[in-house]
Amino acid sequence: MNIKKVLTVLSALIALSFIPTLNVQADVTDTNITSSIGWKNENGSWYYYKSDNTKAIGWIKPDNNWYHLDEDSGKMTTGWLEDKGNWYYMDDNGVMVKGWKQLDGDWYLLTDSGARATGIQQDNSNLYYFKDSGVMATNTGWTKINDKWYYFDKDGKIHTGWVENNDKWYYSNDDGSMVTGTDKIGNTTYVFSDTGEMETGWVNVNNNWYYFNTDRSVATGWINLDGVWYYLNDNGSMATGWVTSNGSDYYYLDATSGKMLTDTTIDGYKIGSDGKRYKPLNTIPLSTGSKGSGDTMKKIYNSVNDSANKYELDSKLILAIIKAESDFDPKATSSSGATGLMQIMPQNYTYLGMTDGYDIEQNIDGGSKLLKEYLNQFNGDVKIAIAAYNAGPQNVKKDGVLSDDDLCKMSQGVQDYVKRVMQYYKDGSIAIDGKNLIEA
Protein backbone atom coordinates (compact mmCIF):
# COMPACT_ATOMS: atom_id res chain seq x y z
CA MET A 1 0.00 0.00 0.00
CA ASN A 2 1.09 3.46 -0.77
CA ILE A 3 1.07 4.91 2.74
CA LYS A 4 1.65 8.43 1.46
CA LYS A 5 -1.35 8.31 -0.82
CA VAL A 6 -3.61 7.12 1.99
CA LEU A 7 -2.48 9.86 4.31
CA THR A 8 -3.14 12.46 1.62
CA VAL A 9 -6.78 11.31 1.21
CA LEU A 10 -7.34 11.26 4.99
CA SER A 11 -5.96 14.76 5.31
CA ALA A 12 -8.33 16.01 2.64
CA LEU A 13 -11.33 14.42 4.38
CA ILE A 14 -10.38 15.88 7.72
CA ALA A 15 -10.07 19.30 6.15
CA LEU A 16 -13.51 19.07 4.62
CA SER A 17 -15.06 18.27 7.98
CA PHE A 18 -14.14 21.75 9.26
CA ILE A 19 -15.90 23.73 6.43
CA PRO A 20 -18.89 25.72 8.03
CA THR A 21 -22.52 24.78 6.98
CA LEU A 22 -24.97 27.39 5.39
CA ASN A 23 -28.69 27.74 6.55
CA VAL A 24 -31.25 28.29 3.74
CA GLN A 25 -34.66 30.12 4.59
CA ALA A 26 -37.68 29.07 2.49
CA ASP A 27 -39.65 31.86 0.73
CA VAL A 28 -43.10 32.25 2.50
CA THR A 29 -44.59 33.11 -0.85
CA ASP A 30 -43.62 29.71 -2.16
CA THR A 31 -47.03 27.97 -2.29
CA ASN A 32 -45.32 24.62 -2.52
CA ILE A 33 -43.96 24.88 1.04
CA THR A 34 -46.67 23.96 3.65
CA SER A 35 -44.61 22.50 6.43
CA SER A 36 -45.77 25.20 9.00
CA ILE A 37 -49.11 24.69 10.93
CA GLY A 38 -51.34 27.81 11.49
CA TRP A 39 -51.68 31.09 9.65
CA LYS A 40 -49.84 31.63 6.37
CA ASN A 41 -49.92 34.58 4.03
CA GLU A 42 -49.90 33.46 0.43
CA ASN A 43 -49.91 36.09 -2.29
CA GLY A 44 -51.40 38.69 0.10
CA SER A 45 -54.19 36.44 1.42
CA TRP A 46 -54.28 34.59 4.69
CA TYR A 47 -54.94 30.88 5.13
CA TYR A 48 -54.92 28.55 8.07
CA TYR A 49 -53.21 25.19 7.82
CA LYS A 50 -54.24 22.25 9.93
CA SER A 51 -51.95 19.62 11.42
CA ASP A 52 -52.36 17.47 8.33
CA ASN A 53 -51.02 20.36 6.25
CA THR A 54 -54.42 20.99 4.59
CA LYS A 55 -56.13 24.38 4.49
CA ALA A 56 -58.94 24.92 6.98
CA ILE A 57 -62.32 26.14 5.68
CA GLY A 58 -65.47 27.56 7.37
CA TRP A 59 -65.50 28.77 10.95
CA ILE A 60 -62.44 28.28 13.14
CA LYS A 61 -61.42 29.43 16.60
CA PRO A 62 -57.65 28.99 16.88
CA ASP A 63 -57.46 31.51 19.72
CA ASN A 64 -60.06 33.48 21.66
CA ASN A 65 -61.62 34.78 18.45
CA TRP A 66 -63.70 33.38 15.64
CA TYR A 67 -62.57 33.55 12.03
CA HIS A 68 -64.16 32.48 8.77
CA LEU A 69 -62.33 30.87 5.85
CA ASP A 70 -63.84 30.63 2.39
CA GLU A 71 -65.54 27.28 1.90
CA ASP A 72 -63.82 26.73 -1.46
CA SER A 73 -60.41 28.41 -1.29
CA GLY A 74 -59.83 28.61 2.46
CA LYS A 75 -59.07 32.32 2.15
CA MET A 76 -59.68 34.35 5.34
CA THR A 77 -62.86 36.49 5.16
CA THR A 78 -62.98 40.18 6.00
CA GLY A 79 -65.92 42.61 5.88
CA TRP A 80 -69.55 41.46 5.73
CA LEU A 81 -70.27 37.75 5.59
CA GLU A 82 -73.63 36.05 5.05
CA ASP A 83 -73.86 32.57 6.50
CA LYS A 84 -77.04 30.54 6.82
CA GLY A 85 -79.27 33.61 6.69
CA ASN A 86 -77.29 35.63 9.22
CA TRP A 87 -74.86 38.46 8.60
CA TYR A 88 -71.52 38.76 10.38
CA TYR A 89 -68.78 41.34 10.24
CA MET A 90 -65.12 40.28 10.16
CA ASP A 91 -62.59 43.03 10.84
CA ASP A 92 -59.36 43.63 8.87
CA ASN A 93 -57.66 40.90 10.91
CA GLY A 94 -60.45 38.48 10.13
CA VAL A 95 -61.79 38.52 13.69
CA MET A 96 -65.57 38.22 14.04
CA VAL A 97 -66.90 41.46 15.62
CA LYS A 98 -69.28 41.54 18.58
CA GLY A 99 -71.10 44.55 20.06
CA TRP A 100 -71.41 47.97 18.48
CA LYS A 101 -69.77 48.72 15.14
CA GLN A 102 -69.88 51.95 13.14
CA LEU A 103 -69.40 51.67 9.37
CA ASP A 104 -69.71 54.57 6.97
CA GLY A 105 -71.50 56.62 9.61
CA ASP A 106 -74.10 53.93 10.39
CA TRP A 107 -74.28 51.96 13.62
CA TYR A 108 -74.75 48.20 13.80
CA LEU A 109 -75.10 45.85 16.74
CA LEU A 110 -73.47 42.44 16.48
CA THR A 111 -74.88 39.98 19.01
CA ASP A 112 -72.85 37.66 21.23
CA SER A 113 -73.08 35.05 18.49
CA GLY A 114 -71.76 37.64 16.04
CA ALA A 115 -75.00 37.74 14.05
CA ARG A 116 -76.10 41.20 12.98
CA ALA A 117 -79.12 42.39 15.03
CA THR A 118 -82.40 43.48 13.45
CA GLY A 119 -85.68 44.67 14.96
CA ILE A 120 -85.98 45.95 18.52
CA GLN A 121 -82.99 45.05 20.66
CA GLN A 122 -82.03 45.78 24.25
CA ASP A 123 -78.49 46.78 25.15
CA ASN A 124 -78.04 47.18 28.88
CA SER A 125 -81.17 49.09 29.91
CA ASN A 126 -81.75 50.81 26.55
CA LEU A 127 -83.88 49.78 23.58
CA TYR A 128 -82.92 50.37 19.95
CA TYR A 129 -84.43 49.53 16.58
CA PHE A 130 -82.38 48.07 13.74
CA LYS A 131 -83.67 47.93 10.18
CA ASP A 132 -83.57 44.77 8.07
CA SER A 133 -80.20 46.00 6.80
CA GLY A 134 -78.95 46.06 10.39
CA VAL A 135 -78.58 49.85 10.41
CA MET A 136 -79.74 51.42 13.69
CA ALA A 137 -82.73 53.74 13.19
CA THR A 138 -81.91 57.33 14.08
CA ASN A 139 -85.30 58.92 13.41
CA THR A 140 -86.84 60.87 16.31
CA GLY A 141 -90.44 61.11 17.50
CA TRP A 142 -93.18 58.54 16.92
CA THR A 143 -92.55 55.62 14.56
CA LYS A 144 -94.88 52.73 13.77
CA ILE A 145 -93.29 49.28 13.86
CA ASN A 146 -95.38 46.14 13.33
CA ASP A 147 -98.65 47.92 14.13
CA LYS A 148 -97.29 49.43 17.35
CA TRP A 149 -96.07 52.95 17.99
CA TYR A 150 -92.69 53.76 19.53
CA TYR A 151 -91.12 57.05 20.51
CA PHE A 152 -87.46 57.61 19.56
CA ASP A 153 -85.21 60.02 21.41
CA LYS A 154 -82.61 62.08 19.56
CA ASP A 155 -79.86 59.53 20.23
CA GLY A 156 -81.87 56.70 18.66
CA LYS A 157 -83.00 55.15 21.92
CA ILE A 158 -86.59 53.95 22.18
CA HIS A 159 -88.24 55.85 25.01
CA THR A 160 -90.02 54.03 27.86
CA GLY A 161 -92.24 55.53 30.54
CA TRP A 162 -93.86 58.96 30.28
CA VAL A 163 -93.45 60.93 27.06
CA GLU A 164 -94.43 64.57 26.60
CA ASN A 165 -94.97 65.48 22.96
CA ASN A 166 -96.70 68.59 21.64
CA ASP A 167 -98.09 69.40 25.10
CA LYS A 168 -99.68 65.93 25.32
CA TRP A 169 -98.72 63.10 27.64
CA TYR A 170 -98.21 59.54 26.47
CA TYR A 171 -96.92 56.42 28.16
CA SER A 172 -94.70 53.71 26.69
CA ASN A 173 -94.53 50.21 28.14
CA ASP A 174 -91.28 48.57 29.20
CA ASP A 175 -91.01 47.18 25.64
CA GLY A 176 -91.33 50.73 24.28
CA SER A 177 -94.81 50.30 22.78
CA MET A 178 -97.31 53.13 23.27
CA VAL A 179 -100.18 52.53 25.72
CA THR A 180 -103.81 52.99 24.70
CA GLY A 181 -106.97 52.45 26.73
CA THR A 182 -106.93 52.00 30.51
CA ASP A 183 -103.65 51.22 32.23
CA LYS A 184 -102.53 51.21 35.86
CA ILE A 185 -99.21 53.00 36.28
CA GLY A 186 -97.87 52.87 39.80
CA ASN A 187 -100.89 53.23 42.06
CA THR A 188 -102.92 55.29 39.60
CA THR A 189 -105.15 54.13 36.76
CA TYR A 190 -105.01 56.34 33.67
CA VAL A 191 -107.03 56.42 30.47
CA PHE A 192 -105.37 56.94 27.09
CA SER A 193 -107.08 57.62 23.77
CA ASP A 194 -106.76 55.40 20.69
CA THR A 195 -103.93 57.67 19.56
CA GLY A 196 -102.19 57.42 22.91
CA GLU A 197 -102.88 60.84 24.47
CA MET A 198 -103.57 60.74 28.20
CA GLU A 199 -107.12 61.85 28.90
CA THR A 200 -107.36 64.97 31.06
CA GLY A 201 -110.24 66.62 32.87
CA TRP A 202 -113.08 64.36 34.00
CA VAL A 203 -112.33 60.72 33.28
CA ASN A 204 -114.47 57.71 34.20
CA VAL A 205 -112.44 54.77 35.51
CA ASN A 206 -114.29 51.63 36.63
CA ASN A 207 -117.52 53.62 37.14
CA ASN A 208 -115.80 56.26 39.27
CA TRP A 209 -115.03 59.79 38.14
CA TYR A 210 -111.57 61.29 38.47
CA TYR A 211 -110.14 64.63 37.45
CA PHE A 212 -106.73 64.51 35.75
CA ASN A 213 -104.67 67.68 35.52
CA THR A 214 -102.58 68.46 32.45
CA ASP A 215 -99.41 67.74 34.47
CA ARG A 216 -100.55 64.06 34.88
CA SER A 217 -101.50 64.53 38.54
CA VAL A 218 -104.82 63.29 39.86
CA ALA A 219 -106.79 66.00 41.64
CA THR A 220 -107.70 65.44 45.28
CA GLY A 221 -109.53 67.56 47.80
CA TRP A 222 -111.56 70.60 46.76
CA ILE A 223 -111.36 71.83 43.18
CA ASN A 224 -113.26 74.68 41.52
CA LEU A 225 -114.21 74.30 37.88
CA ASP A 226 -116.03 77.16 36.18
CA GLY A 227 -117.29 78.43 39.51
CA VAL A 228 -118.52 75.03 40.73
CA TRP A 229 -116.93 73.22 43.66
CA TYR A 230 -116.21 69.47 43.71
CA TYR A 231 -114.51 67.27 46.26
CA LEU A 232 -112.16 64.44 45.28
CA ASN A 233 -111.37 61.70 47.81
CA ASP A 234 -107.79 60.85 48.78
CA ASN A 235 -107.67 58.26 45.95
CA GLY A 236 -108.92 60.87 43.49
CA SER A 237 -112.46 59.52 43.06
CA MET A 238 -115.24 62.11 42.95
CA ALA A 239 -117.17 62.29 46.21
CA THR A 240 -120.95 62.48 46.44
CA GLY A 241 -123.36 62.99 49.32
CA TRP A 242 -122.23 64.46 52.63
CA VAL A 243 -118.53 65.20 52.97
CA THR A 244 -116.29 66.98 55.44
CA SER A 245 -112.70 68.00 54.88
CA ASN A 246 -111.95 69.24 58.40
CA GLY A 247 -114.23 67.14 60.59
CA SER A 248 -116.50 70.04 61.52
CA ASP A 249 -117.92 71.64 58.36
CA TYR A 250 -120.18 69.47 56.21
CA TYR A 251 -121.13 69.95 52.58
CA TYR A 252 -123.47 68.08 50.27
CA LEU A 253 -122.38 67.00 46.80
CA ASP A 254 -124.91 66.06 44.16
CA ALA A 255 -125.21 62.28 43.84
CA THR A 256 -124.90 62.36 40.03
CA SER A 257 -122.74 65.34 39.08
CA GLY A 258 -120.71 65.71 42.29
CA LYS A 259 -121.42 69.45 42.35
CA MET A 260 -121.53 71.10 45.76
CA LEU A 261 -125.06 72.27 46.48
CA THR A 262 -125.88 75.70 47.93
CA ASP A 263 -128.97 77.50 49.22
CA THR A 264 -131.11 74.41 49.72
CA THR A 265 -132.22 71.92 52.37
CA ILE A 266 -130.89 68.34 52.45
CA ASP A 267 -131.91 65.71 55.02
CA GLY A 268 -133.45 68.44 57.11
CA TYR A 269 -130.28 70.54 57.15
CA LYS A 270 -130.11 74.06 55.83
CA ILE A 271 -127.35 74.49 53.23
CA GLY A 272 -126.05 78.05 53.01
CA SER A 273 -124.76 80.00 50.03
CA ASP A 274 -121.25 78.88 50.99
CA GLY A 275 -122.30 75.23 50.81
CA LYS A 276 -121.93 74.63 54.55
CA ARG A 277 -124.47 72.63 56.51
CA TYR A 278 -126.04 74.57 59.37
CA LYS A 279 -127.83 73.39 62.51
CA PRO A 280 -131.38 72.22 61.85
CA LEU A 281 -134.33 73.92 63.46
CA ASN A 282 -135.10 71.66 66.36
CA THR A 283 -138.54 72.90 67.38
CA ILE A 284 -140.88 69.92 67.20
CA PRO A 285 -144.53 70.96 67.12
CA LEU A 286 -146.87 68.41 68.69
CA SER A 287 -149.89 67.13 66.84
CA THR A 288 -153.06 67.96 68.62
CA GLY A 289 -154.99 65.03 69.98
CA SER A 290 -151.86 62.86 70.16
CA LYS A 291 -150.72 60.98 73.24
CA GLY A 292 -147.53 62.89 72.59
CA SER A 293 -148.99 65.77 74.50
CA GLY A 294 -148.65 63.76 77.69
CA ASP A 295 -145.87 64.31 80.21
CA THR A 296 -143.79 61.36 78.99
CA MET A 297 -143.89 62.47 75.38
CA LYS A 298 -143.12 66.05 76.30
CA LYS A 299 -140.08 64.81 78.23
CA ILE A 300 -139.00 62.80 75.19
CA TYR A 301 -139.38 65.84 72.92
CA ASN A 302 -137.45 68.10 75.29
CA SER A 303 -134.65 65.53 75.59
CA VAL A 304 -134.53 65.10 71.82
CA ASN A 305 -134.30 68.87 71.34
CA ASP A 306 -131.54 69.16 73.94
CA SER A 307 -129.50 66.36 72.34
CA ALA A 308 -130.11 67.69 68.83
CA ASN A 309 -128.67 71.05 69.85
CA LYS A 310 -125.85 69.51 71.87
CA TYR A 311 -124.64 67.22 69.08
CA GLU A 312 -125.78 69.32 66.09
CA LEU A 313 -128.22 66.67 64.90
CA ASP A 314 -131.58 66.81 63.19
CA SER A 315 -134.20 66.18 65.87
CA LYS A 316 -136.37 64.37 63.33
CA LEU A 317 -133.58 61.85 62.73
CA ILE A 318 -133.32 61.13 66.46
CA LEU A 319 -137.08 60.64 66.66
CA ALA A 320 -137.03 58.36 63.63
CA ILE A 321 -134.47 56.09 65.32
CA ILE A 322 -136.45 56.08 68.59
CA LYS A 323 -139.55 55.05 66.61
CA ALA A 324 -137.65 52.21 64.89
CA GLU A 325 -135.84 51.06 68.04
CA SER A 326 -138.51 51.19 70.76
CA ASP A 327 -141.72 52.69 69.34
CA PHE A 328 -141.34 55.35 72.06
CA ASP A 329 -141.41 52.90 74.95
CA PRO A 330 -138.87 54.11 77.57
CA LYS A 331 -138.98 50.68 79.27
CA ALA A 332 -138.33 48.65 76.10
CA THR A 333 -135.79 45.82 76.43
CA SER A 334 -134.54 43.74 73.52
CA SER A 335 -133.74 40.02 73.57
CA SER A 336 -130.05 40.94 73.47
CA GLY A 337 -130.40 43.20 76.50
CA ALA A 338 -130.49 46.62 74.81
CA THR A 339 -132.45 49.11 76.89
CA GLY A 340 -134.70 52.14 76.61
CA LEU A 341 -135.85 54.45 73.87
CA MET A 342 -132.71 54.19 71.71
CA GLN A 343 -131.83 50.64 72.77
CA ILE A 344 -128.43 51.14 74.41
CA MET A 345 -126.38 48.07 75.33
CA PRO A 346 -125.38 48.04 79.04
CA GLN A 347 -121.68 47.57 78.18
CA ASN A 348 -121.79 51.04 76.56
CA TYR A 349 -123.21 52.83 79.63
CA THR A 350 -119.85 53.91 81.04
CA TYR A 351 -118.55 55.22 77.72
CA LEU A 352 -121.75 57.18 77.16
CA GLY A 353 -121.89 58.52 80.73
CA MET A 354 -125.04 56.59 81.60
CA THR A 355 -126.10 54.89 84.82
CA ASP A 356 -129.71 54.06 83.97
CA GLY A 357 -130.59 52.78 80.50
CA TYR A 358 -134.26 53.45 81.05
CA ASP A 359 -133.82 57.09 82.00
CA ILE A 360 -135.23 59.14 79.14
CA GLU A 361 -132.65 61.92 79.21
CA GLN A 362 -129.65 59.61 79.66
CA ASN A 363 -130.83 57.22 76.98
CA ILE A 364 -131.52 59.86 74.35
CA ASP A 365 -128.26 61.68 75.13
CA GLY A 366 -126.28 58.43 74.86
CA GLY A 367 -127.98 57.32 71.64
CA SER A 368 -127.54 60.78 70.09
CA LYS A 369 -123.85 60.75 70.98
CA LEU A 370 -123.41 57.43 69.17
CA LEU A 371 -125.36 58.71 66.16
CA LYS A 372 -123.16 61.81 65.93
CA GLU A 373 -120.00 59.67 66.10
CA TYR A 374 -121.23 57.47 63.26
CA LEU A 375 -122.11 60.49 61.13
CA ASN A 376 -118.59 61.85 61.64
CA GLN A 377 -117.05 58.45 61.03
CA PHE A 378 -118.87 58.00 57.73
CA ASN A 379 -118.52 61.57 56.41
CA GLY A 380 -122.03 62.67 57.27
CA ASP A 381 -123.75 59.95 55.24
CA VAL A 382 -127.10 59.55 57.02
CA LYS A 383 -127.98 56.12 55.63
CA ILE A 384 -124.60 54.59 56.45
CA ALA A 385 -124.74 56.13 59.95
CA ILE A 386 -128.16 54.54 60.45
CA ALA A 387 -126.78 51.18 59.32
CA ALA A 388 -123.91 51.58 61.79
CA TYR A 389 -126.36 52.37 64.59
CA ASN A 390 -128.16 49.10 63.88
CA ALA A 391 -125.28 46.74 63.01
CA GLY A 392 -122.25 48.49 64.49
CA PRO A 393 -119.60 50.47 62.57
CA GLN A 394 -117.22 47.53 62.48
CA ASN A 395 -119.72 45.48 60.44
CA VAL A 396 -120.32 48.37 58.07
CA LYS A 397 -116.58 48.47 57.35
CA LYS A 398 -116.33 44.69 57.21
CA ASP A 399 -119.02 44.58 54.51
CA GLY A 400 -117.14 47.19 52.47
CA VAL A 401 -119.82 49.90 52.62
CA LEU A 402 -118.32 53.08 51.19
CA SER A 403 -121.44 54.70 49.76
CA ASP A 404 -125.21 54.32 49.84
CA ASP A 405 -124.99 52.02 46.83
CA ASP A 406 -122.96 49.57 48.94
CA LEU A 407 -125.68 49.09 51.55
CA CYS A 408 -126.91 46.14 49.50
CA LYS A 409 -123.84 44.28 50.75
CA MET A 410 -125.27 44.20 54.26
CA SER A 411 -127.85 41.77 55.62
CA GLN A 412 -131.48 42.15 54.59
CA GLY A 413 -132.36 43.02 58.18
CA VAL A 414 -130.00 45.98 58.19
CA GLN A 415 -131.27 47.13 54.79
CA ASP A 416 -134.87 46.98 55.99
CA TYR A 417 -133.93 48.91 59.15
CA VAL A 418 -132.32 51.70 57.12
CA LYS A 419 -135.36 51.95 54.84
CA ARG A 420 -137.74 52.06 57.81
CA VAL A 421 -135.81 54.80 59.62
CA MET A 422 -135.48 56.85 56.43
CA GLN A 423 -139.20 56.56 55.84
CA TYR A 424 -139.96 57.84 59.34
CA TYR A 425 -137.34 60.53 58.93
CA LYS A 426 -138.31 61.91 55.53
CA ASP A 427 -142.05 61.33 55.51
CA GLY A 428 -142.69 62.61 59.02
CA SER A 429 -144.85 59.53 59.59
CA ILE A 430 -143.71 58.66 63.11
CA ALA A 431 -146.93 57.89 64.89
CA ILE A 432 -148.48 56.47 68.04
CA ASP A 433 -152.08 55.31 67.86
CA GLY A 434 -152.18 56.54 64.27
CA LYS A 435 -151.29 60.12 65.15
CA ASN A 436 -148.27 61.97 63.80
CA LEU A 437 -145.72 63.07 66.34
CA ILE A 438 -144.26 65.51 63.83
CA GLU A 439 -146.30 68.01 61.87
CA ALA A 440 -146.18 67.16 58.16
Image (cartoon, rainbow, N blue to C red):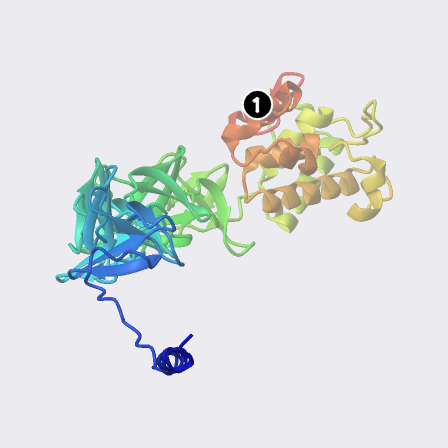
- Percent across and percent down for residue 153 are 23, 58
Q: Quadrant of residue 164?
A: bottom left
Q: In this view, which residue lies farthest toward the front? A: 1
- Percent across and percent down for residue 338 are 81, 30
Q: Residue at x 38, y 46 (%)?
A: 260
Quarter of the image with the N terminus is: bottom left
Left or right? Give the position of 186 relative to 97: right
Q: Residue at x 65, y 31 (%)?
A: 321
Q: Is residue 107 above or below residue 340?
A: below
- Percent across and percent down for residue 219 are 38, 52
- Percent across and percent down for residue 13 are 38, 77
Left or right? Give the position of 264 relative to 94: right
**Residue 369 visible in the shown view:** yes
State the SS at label 1.
loop
Q: Is residue 7 above or below residue 224?
A: below
Q: In this view, which residue lies farthest toward the left? A: 104
Q: Looking at this view, is 62 or 302 the one in front?
A: 62
Label 1 is placed on what type of residue? Ser
**Residue 200 visible in the shown view:** no
According to the image, label 1 marks what residue?
A: 429
Q: Is residue 143 above or below residue 105?
A: above
Q: Residue at x 69, y 45 (%)?
A: 369
**Count of labels shown?**
1
Q: Looking at this view, is 104 or 391 the one in front?
A: 104
Q: Looking at this view, is 136 or 381 the one in front?
A: 136
Pointer 1 local density, CA inside 10 Å: few below 14, some 14–19, many at least 20: some
